[in-house]
Amino acid sequence: MLNLGIIGCGNIGRTIIRAIYEGKIDCKIIGVFDANKDGYNALSDEIKKQIKFFDNFDKFIEANTNLILEAASQQAVKEYAVGVLKHDKNLMLMSVGALNDKNLFEEIKRTAKEKNLKIYIPSGAVVGIDGVKAAMFGCIESVTLTTRKNPKSLGIASDEEKILFDGNADEAVVKFPKNINVAATLSLAGIGFEKTKVKIIADPNISENIHEIRIKGNFGEILTVARNLPSPDNPKTSYLASLAAMACLKRITSEIEMGT
Ligand SMILES: NC(=O)c1ccc[n+]([C@@H]2O[C@H](COP(=O)([O-])OP(=O)(O)OC[C@H]3O[C@@H](n4cnc5c(N)ncnc54)[C@H](O)[C@@H]3O)[C@@H](O)[C@H]2O)c1
């Protein structure tokens, strides 16, 4: 049985909690940890009766869980990821941009290996990660991500279309930490942060978060476009990201694994 603990009871955390309570995934939520109780308070009384809220990580991590889902922030990954693994719990990460810190990523991987644990990284708000992983066994020439969002979702005001960033994923995750988990996921699945090209465009004429991925290699070419609707209570988060985390949990609890 999957006994889940969740770090971060925000938009993604609550969406997953509700899905589990609707019986969509066969697992039990033991507790949630958050520095702020507002998100937990927004859950229904019925759900709150069954899930313990922790504002103290040391107490949270002692609870009887075997997988911790981080849906909080890059800072939370820095603060808690290694501690989660040291307590013999598998880890699922949503704030993937944090793994651009190479020392942190190496420590997370080393600890997971020593403890024989798994780190799960859902494909999040992007499509085509399966293809990138497969293409890595051939030869990839280039990976390009073009992210197009409404200026509000990027935290700026603009009446016209503007290229805000054109560079590699390494710089993109630093300059747009709250918006660029997709670049991090794509980089980790493929040719790395330095070689993955990223363009970020603010477009006042759209309401969706659009991620276009183009991969060229000796297998041919992959082009995917995800036109994501923002989550109802957080315009910066694509709804597909929460759904991808659910699909990842479902894969862990199922007999059959689909895709690469
Ligand atoms: N992988 C992807 O494709 C993808 C897509 C969207 C969002 N995300 C990331 O997932 C994370 C959660 O997104 P969200 O929309 O649910 O955010 P949110 O702001 O709605 O909720 C985050 C919650 O985590 C809590 N939190 C943050 N840092 C914390 C810390 N250090 N300690 C304890 N609690 C902390 C906050 O109090 C808040 O309740 C964000 O980092 C976001 O960038 C990833």
Image: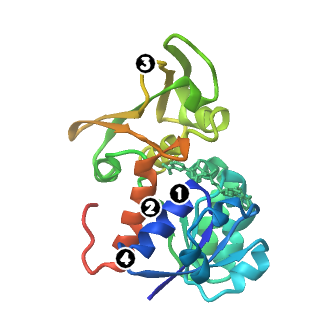
Q: Earlier in the sequence, mark 4 or mark 2?
A: 4
The residue wearing badge 1 is 12
Q: Is residue 218 left or right of residue 38?
A: left
**Could you tell me residue 174's position as x and y percent?**
66, 37
**Could you tell me residue 232's position as x and y percent?**
49, 46
Looking at the rendered structure, the kind of residue marked 4 is: Gly
- Vertically, is 172 above or below 23? above
- Dot 4 falls on a residue whose secondary structure is loop
Looking at the rendered structure, the kind of residue marked 1 is: Ile
Looking at the rendered structure, the kind of residue marked 3 is: Asn
At a point 62% along the width and 63% down the height, the residue shown is 9
Q: Of the residues tagged 2 and 3, which is closer to the observer?
A: 3
Give the farthest residue toward the front: 45
Q: Of the residues tagged 4 and 1, which is closer to the observer?
A: 4
Q: Of the residues tagged 1 and 2, which is closer to the observer?
A: 1
- Contact between labelled residues 3 and 4, with CB atoms less than 8 Å apart: no
Asked whether the viewer can see residue 8, the reply is no
User: In the drawing, what numbered circle is on residue 99?
Assistant: none
The residue wearing badge 3 is 205
Looking at the rendered structure, the kind of residue marked 2 is: Ala
